[in-house]
Image: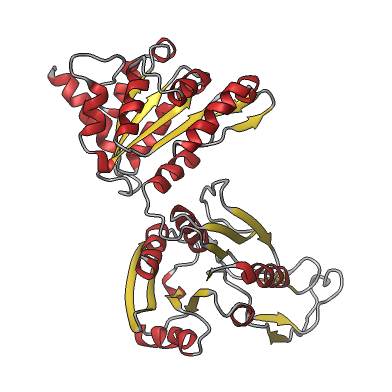
Amino acid sequence: MTSIGVTMFKVSKEIIGEKSNRLAGKKILLGVTSSAAIYRSIDLARELMRHGAEVKVIMSPEATKLVSPELFRWATGNEVVTKLTGDIEHIALTHEDPDNTIILIAPATANTLGKIANGIADNALTALVLSGMGKNLPIIVVPAMHLSMWKAITTQRSISILDKLGIEVIQPIIERDKAKYPEISEIREMVFKKLTKPILKNKKVLVTAGATRVYIDNIRFISNPSSGKMGVAMALESWLRGAEVTLIVSKNSNHGYYIPRGINILEFETYEEAKEIILDKVIESDIFIHAAAISDFKPKGKFKGKIPSGSSINLELEPTEKILELASSRNKECFIIAFKAEWNVSDDELTKRAKQYIEKNIAKAVVANDVSKKIFGSDKTEAYLIYKVEGVERTEKLIGFKRDVASVILDKIFA
């Protein structure tokens, strides 16, 4: 290998861990087949690398006719496998570190799905999958093809067989006459999920996110700057851990996350809408994570129509009902994680106020923030987690990206 080649490889890998280290130490064997969506897998490989993964590409023979292996070599900084040699690449790749290796086939054609379902190993990619199955590696396939081929009874039979074999199939996006490659963000989240311990499997988790509005007149309202980022992060992390998740989120939130199709989304705008949905859904929930910034006050009376500009008004506010307390009374068996926001208080005072939720048996755990530290709308947070382990109360300070903090919260409480 030339020195120029070595330099190129290093440059290609500079993006590893750019966004997170969630996939650090993980090797993703990216199988690529001859779907017209093949070009999207270049971006997929780079996205997985940005979260810390080492990506190695294996192409079917027909795929190499659509995109040069050199492009994937550039994208990943690794040699691309296009055929088997005396190095028995399919064995070497699947046996090297099976505890930290996952196979992802994206895009997957109907032809390749059929071969995998029937144990056919006639090229480097299908041989790799067969070897991976023998090593019990996690396997994900991402079908992409013409709709008529997707609907064909033989294709659907292949999908059924793959499901029985424990292979994860990410359903395509159906648009007009195409079964299209899903969003790269959804594939990334599914990879995260496949590599996350399912500590919340068979649990129904209800999560709230974002800010409520209370209207003064028909167009003006009182609210707060909550973006919903923390609540959505909690929903995503619960879903990764195998939970059946319902996310109740403000339709005006600006959380910026991609929410996978596996999460049930219900929207609210006003305090009353949020209250109605929460109290309805909490009855059937095992865990309730109440991260939404709910209005504490509402006008005693709403003005009709639009208050004329330039008019002086006297606005009298009254407290709203505490939805968290109502939810706790509605389902006493539900494990509730409350969020407590205060402004410019000491750490001792912050945790003291948060602990009242546990002392009053309203919640089992509390996440407390001092929102004077510019937490609203930020990607990062600083919080105290108060919870009990075997009857012993613990208080831990958590600082970092909200997605990472959400992950730590769930693992601390439920792992």
Residue 387, quarter of picture = bottom left
Q: Judge by depth and name the residue closer to the eye, 352 or 92.
A: 92
Q: If the image is split into quadrants, where does the C terminus sit?
A: bottom left
Residue visible at 51% across and 37% down? 170
The residue drawn where x is 65% and y is 20% is: 148
Image location of residue 345, percent across then percent down: 41, 84
In this picture, residue 303 sits left or right of residue 260: right
Residue 165 placed where, x, y %? 44, 36
* Residue name at image x 71 percent, y 85 percent: 317
Q: Nearer the viewer, residue 173 or 229?
A: 173
Query: Residue 217: percent from the left, percent from the top?
Result: 80, 72
Left or right, 348 with respect to 376, comes to: left
Up the image or down, 88 lies above or below 198; here it is above
Answer with the quarter of the image where residue 223 lies: bottom right
Residue 390: image x %, image y %?
34, 80
Q: Quadrant of the N terminus?
A: top left
In this rendering, the answer to whether 118 lies above or below 391 is above
Scheme of image coloration: secondary structure
